[in-house]
DNA sequence: TCAAATCCACTGACCGGTTGGTTGCTAGCC
DNA sequence: GGCTAGCAACCAACCGGTCAGTGGATTTGA
């Protein structure tokens, strides 16, 4: 096996993503991560410091990847909802990871990245409303929360419905885009 | 301390509800539950069998309590959304518990109670649509998913927004009720 | 006096983290 | 080119502590 620190970090990060997404912080096992990455447990501590910091690294990377792949667009909220849905569909671990984060981390310590992103969104929606591009029926905060909830609707309530869910992904997508359009049509 | 098996079970169940809701299945500590209930750890195994079964008991009870307190009403979906919101607001542990459940339990084994409740809901919405009481723009499954997602919107995305959230509970409630009315107004 | 309820003290497995040492790449010297 | 010193990358084995679960004694109420 070639000795390559960067590649080892990469393998650890990938294995950790799968492990944390599957079992959460408390449920994740450091030994399993090391085994899945094909290297020794000690490397985790050499490269990331601790289990918690490894989770931080994973979460940070996934968050950045999401923001990069699904740019927010206040002028096209329905389209954004659809693209967020697509991302959740293709990368279910992202949503699981942030759900674990919300549950397992104390309420007050949240990643600055997310807070900042939300502030930007609120500002953009506010400006778009002033410019008349977005109807003012809902406030920016209301819109952010509604859209966030809707874009993940199929994934957060997935398991309970089971086989009753529409098999057609495009249909599920359309439901959300249509619903957001409905909200924006409100007067 | 009076010897009362029922009351001891009750105290254990209450303590377990708080513990599981706070830390999840993997993160919950049996010793903490016993200490909080003011009795010995062994009682958990005498009355509930195992940590997992204790969680089942807690989850089962909370689920039943929710269904009893917030009856589904296909003829008044907006009102149902508001009442569900109220319940989540007053009993945040319920929502946390079911989120833990979704994350920590394998996808295929889900409580029959929830599956059945969902089937009932789908049937009721279908009938209400046939009777013309509910518009047919969305299918029953779509409506269930959208309404479920919306009723918990403030609570699932709560932490990220933090201080930007409307302090007024009535305002948050109205947002959801209005949004559902918007969906139902779709043609 | 008997059965149910309760608890103490213990166990074996496991888990996050560390230690002390080994392996393999490469820069620099001859 | 061949040799080697030095260092980064890597690992097996271990450690202290924690955890879910239990056997057996003890207490209580009927």
Image (cartoon, coloured by chain):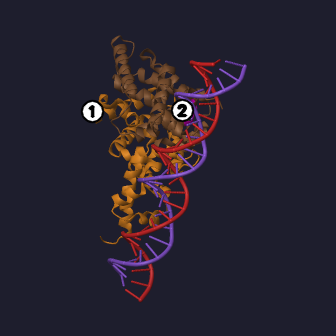
Chain colours: A brown, B orange, C red, D purple
Q: Against B163, is A22 above or below?
A: below
Magenta stretch holds residue A63: no
On the question of residue B145 being in view, the answer is: no
Q: Quadrant of residue C25?
A: top right
Residue at screen point 45% across, 52% down: B59
Which structural element holds mark 2?
helix
Q: Against A101, is D14 above or below?
A: below
Q: Is residue A25 left or right of residue A18?
A: left
Image mark count: 2
Q: Which chain carries label 2?
A: A
The numbered mark at residue B167 is 1
Question: Do callouts 2 and 1 mark residues in contact (Cβ within 8 Å)?
Answer: no
Give the extent of the magenta segment.
A9-15
Which structural element holds mark 1?
loop
Q: Position of residue A26 (x, y in %)?
A: 46, 45
On the question of residue A113 being in view, the answer is: yes
């Amino acid at each position: 096996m070639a000795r390559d620190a960067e590649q080892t970090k990469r393998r650890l990060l990938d294995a950790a993503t799968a492990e944390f997404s599957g079992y959460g912080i408390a449920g994740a096992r450091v030994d399993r991560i090391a085994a899945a990455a094909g290297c020794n447990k000690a490397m985790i501590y050499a490269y990331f410091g601790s289990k918690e910091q490894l989770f931080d690294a994973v979460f940070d990377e996934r968050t950045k990847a999401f923001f990069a792949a699904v740019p927010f667009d206040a002028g096209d909220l329905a389209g954004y909802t659809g693209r967020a849905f697509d991302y959740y569909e293709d990368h279910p671990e992202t949503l699981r990871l942030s759900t674990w984060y919300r549950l397992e981390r104390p309420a007050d310590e949240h990643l600055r990245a997310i807070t900042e992103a939300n502030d930007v969104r609120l500002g953009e929606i506010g400006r778009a409303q002033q410019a008349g591009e977005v109807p003012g029926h809902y406030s920016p905060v209301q819109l952010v929360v509604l859209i966030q909830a809707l874009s993940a609707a199929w994934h957060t309530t997935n398991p309970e419905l089971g086989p009753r869910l529409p098999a057609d992904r495009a249909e599920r997508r359309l439901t959300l885009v249509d619903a957001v359009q409905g909200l924006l049509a409100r007067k």
